[in-house]
Image (cartoon, helix red, strand yellow):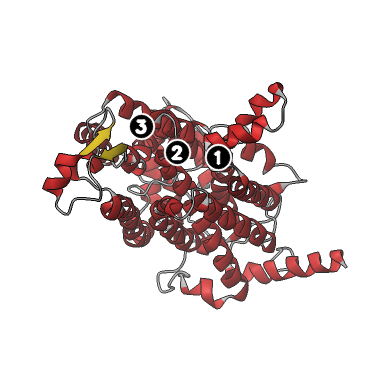
Amino acid sequence: MAAGLEEAFGAAGEFGGAQRRLTAFLVLLQVYVACQSMLIVLVGAMPEYRIDQEGIPASKAELAKHIHFMSNFTSIVTEWYLIEQEAYKVSLASSLFFAGLLIGNITFGPLSDKLGRKPVYISGSLTNLTFAVGIAVYALLGYCVREWRHLALVSNTPGVIFLLLSFMLPESPRWLYSQGKTAEAEDVMQYIALGNGKERLNLKLKPSAGTSRKDESPPGILNLVKHPVLRWRTIILMYIWYVCSLVYYGLTLNAGELGGNLYLNVALYGLVEVPAFPLCMFFIEKPWSGRRKTMMCFLIFAGFACMFTMFLPKNSAERNSALSMMKMSHFRGCSLLLSPTLLALCGKMMVSAAFNIVYIYTSELYPTVLRNAGLGVCSMSCRFGGILAPFVPSMKSLSPSVPLVVFGISGLSAGFLTLLLPETLNKPIAESIEDLQSPKYRVLINEKANQLEEST
């Protein structure tokens, strides 16, 4: 008797040894990706320096004779003297990395729909958590390996291993089934069953009811523009993804600009995300908070945490002077609360939680037939945020608080725009574009109208 895909998964094992090995691979992959994303923070770190003559020498040969770096590590800055007018090249190198991600998103996103999901790794909340741990691992690597070329080699070498292992990954049986490739899906289910220690299954999948006919072209990106509900939903979500990326990567890359121990700052910027994982998982499942309110609150809190830095004293001497004016010795501990680093870490934790939620929330806001297209477009806008993020910390030349104020305004605006989206918790998810017109689905325009009626 033919079985459905869920029944086949039950027979093969829902989460056995095969799935655990695949999960371990993806988790370790995220550690590698974290090292790649944060590579420039240490490889391009700018140590303190002094020049023993007035003005900046015109030539690099002359500059090398008169500049003295106060550090026990090397970087591309110390090797090629990327200071003052040349400092932008460090930010440019980081932006080019994210530009490469954008090109990969545009190129391999559509290919994954045609060729499959095997080479395309979609990370969820667990792998996002591992990404945070990966940042801390990279900080430890940087602490142990102080020469930048060796650090780059150690950080990049695992990529070869992951590339070779990726050829051994099975294709997604859900994708194969949705494409009508039931025979191949059956083979993958057999592979999973054997990997879980089960006997070979006598399995026959029934034809997929949702498979498009060969003469019909599946809905594409243009449908996101044609449908008014999806159009506004997509615009808002693109901006939210852009802000999450801008603030997330901007704050992380800004770790090298803060005072104190460079490696400790980078590690803290990663580890501070760990509490964000249980926080967002707790709140998004509660009826009184749900996806929309939780993401809105995290983005707004992240914005306020960054904005408050503009009201802090500009340096430690001014902070100590402000505390001494209190004339109470037991308030000395408040110096921690007046630290831009602490507020930036709070902002990083909040935006990390929002980043975790936006993946889940976005996938629930799009009909099944357009989910990949919607996630792809939002992911593209996310890369634009990453491209611009490295340049925001350089705005500290205007004022030390300017970068965090930029992140704060972005977070606040994205948080308030989230209110224009509908809640998806315990709501039916649309399967097709036609479902958006069905009364049982809550759409953006109706949600907004109901809110206006309740407020009046």
Q: Earlier in the sequence, mark 2 or mark 1?
A: 2
- As rendered, which of 402 and 214 lies closer to the eye? 402
Estimate the spatial distance between the alpha carbons at disc 2 and disc 3, rounded to whole Å: 18 Å
- Which quadrant, please, contains the C terminus? bottom right
| Residue found at x 52% / y 39% | 315
- Badge 1 is on which residue? 340
Location of residue 73 (image quadrant): top left
Estimate the spatial distance between the alpha carbons at disc 2 and disc 1, rounded to whole Å: 9 Å
Q: Do tag 2 and tag 1 residues touch (Cβ < 8 Å)? A: yes
| Residue found at x 38% / y 57% | 387
Query: How far across and how far down the image is residue 299, in percent?
Result: 62, 50
Please tell me whether residue 228 is drawn above or below residue 327 in the rendered image.
below
Q: Amino acid at mark 1?
A: Pro
- As rendered, which of 159 and 272 lies closer to the eye? 272
The crowd level at tag 3 (other Cα within 10 Å; few <14, some 14-19, many 20+) is many
- Element assignment for label 2: loop
Please tell me whether residue 414 is drawn above or below residue 9 in the rendered image.
below
- Badge 3 is on which residue? 138
Regarding residue 288, the answer to whether it shows in the image is: yes
Query: How far across and how far down the image is residue 361, in percent?
Result: 60, 52
Please tell me whether residue 232 is drawn above or below residue 156 in the rendered image.
below
Estimate the spatial distance between the alpha carbons at disc 3 and disc 1, rounded to whole Å: 23 Å
- Badge 2 is on which residue? 258
- Element assignment for label 1: helix
Q: Residue furthest front?
A: 54
- As rendered, which of 232 and 414 lies closer to the eye? 414
